[in-house]
Image (cartoon, grey):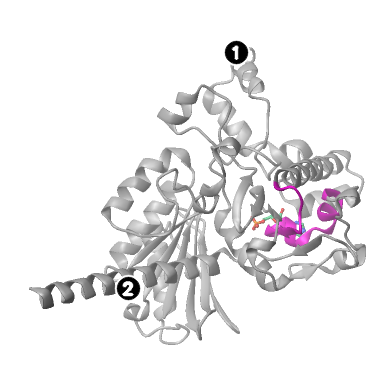
Amino acid sequence: MKILVINCGSATVKFRLFQTQGQDELISLAGGIVSGLGKEDAQMSYHIPDFRFEQQLNRPGYREAIEAAIQCLTNPKYGVVRDVSEIDAAGHRTVHGGDKFTHSVLVDRDVITKMEQCSHLAPLHNPANLAGINQAMALLPKTPQVAVFDTAFHQTIPLHASLYAMPFEMYETHGIRKYGFHGTSCQYIVHRASQLLHQPVEKIRMVICHLGNGVSVTAVKNGHSVENSLGFTSLEGAIMGTRCGALDPGVILYLMTELNFSAEQVYTMLYTKSGLLGISGVSNDMRTITDLAEEGNPRCRLAIEMFAYRLKKYIGSYIAVMGGIDLLVFTGGIGENSPIVRSLAVKDLGFLGIEIDPELNDKALAVESLIHRKPCPVTVAVIPTNEEWMIAKETLEVLAARDRKNAIEKGGEIVKEMNS
Ligand code: AMP
């Protein structure tokens, strides 16, 4: 079977086509990205093994971007399918499913309506995800579409961990609680960790540090998420590229009442001007910040220290939440590539059994690696995340569940006919 994974962001459309192989394998046939949506100089980049194709697109919307992706995938020279009928399903990354979605689902009108009702919870992401789904349904009308929710994996976080200590009706009436994000990435890491450690997930108490542009720390016990540092929105928790993470809510009141900030100004500052960018004053990119810190820039040094210190607080508290830890994972652009962040984040955690080997840590650059000192009770691993693979896998499972349900219904009808 062939599964097309589509990830629509606010400025990009990423896509990848997978093919099933054997029982459990999914191999990537082709992939690409359209960046600069809506701009005159938008770029399409498409690749298959040993071949890359680049093209400029003029002000593409979601429809044009997905159309361009399909044209590449079906191109007689460098495409990987003859026509779209070879694509068995499309799986869509969807950021926020609110309380309405605990699993990935086959998209129909009802699902779209429910997703629209969740859009206010992720105003930057959900409208883009929905636009992608709508355009893919128009362009591939015969292909089943599956929505895979980033929040679904975190639906197992217990109420005592997900509620804010506000009047209870804020939760009951308005759904204000922690939802958690990066669930698809965590699901992949849990799957991969179990293979890597040759242990069932139920036996691994895990802390996953997903450190990319967005940053989250997740506690996984018995294979289920029990805590995640992101919250009602993607602003809570660890320090991110441009987002502040945990902040005294009183600061927001002060900004608005004493400094006359409008809600929009607060929003812009906390989402786009804070985090690594706000502290360093130069960049939200950990590569730039690390280079400048090495040259002696004090604000860049401070940014790295604060970033790692906040991570350490989450790691320690999640170990307490789970009553111990077996595996600590670093993933995401920074987690996979930054030895300095990894080493600072676990500095002085030896008393909890966490110690990393400096040499192994330095060598672990975007490759799956174990980086703990041996012998050491806690495994520390770098595992490059693969959300697209996970979305393809979830899409296959939704299709299989649909087929099982259809077979049961058909069986029931035959029995009914036989009995009548
Ligand atoms: P992601 O959102 O997972 O794609 O991660 C993006 C972030 O990873 C970038 O903003 C960089 O800060 C960071 N990153 C990527 N490569 C490196 C690297 N070699 N060293 C440090 N940080 C990196």
Mark yes or no: residue 132 visible: yes
> Which mark is nearer the camera, 2 or 1?
2
In the picture, the quarter occupied by the C terminus is bottom left
Query: In the rendered structure, are the residues bearing label 2 and label 1 in contact, judged by CB atoms less than 8 Å apart?
Result: no
Residue 232: x, y in percent?
54, 37
Q: Which residue is mark 2?
A: 403
Of callouts 2 and 1, the N-terminal one: 1
- Examine the image and state in which quarter residue 281 appears: top right
Q: Is residue 391 magenta?
A: no
Left/right of residue 273 with respect to residue 122 in the rendered view: right
Tell me where the magenta segment starts and ends, as one range: 322-345
In the picture, the quarter occupied by the N terminus is bottom left
Disc number for residue 257:
1
SS assignment at label 2: helix
- Examine the image and state in which quarter residue 87 appears: bottom left
Residue at the image point whose x is 23% and y is 75% from the top = 411
- Examine the image and state in which quarter residue 256 appears: top right
Residue 128: x, y in percent?
43, 51
Residue at the image point whose x is 84% and y is 42% from the top = 305
Q: In the rendered image of this protein, does residue 304 appear above or below residue 183?
A: above
Residue at the image point whose x is 40% and y is 66% from the top = 398
The extreme top residue here reads 258
How packed mark 2 is, by other alpha carbons closer than 10 Å (few <14, some 14-19, many 20 or more), is few
Q: Quadrant of ligand 1?
A: bottom right
Distance, label 2 to label 1, CA atoms, is: 57 Å
Disc number for residue 197:
none
Foreground of the two, 159 or 58: 159
Left/right of residue 289 with respect to residue 81 in the rendered view: right
Left/right of residue 178 with respect to residue 74 in the rendered view: right
Q: Is residue 342 magenta?
A: yes
Mark yes or no: residue 54 visible: no
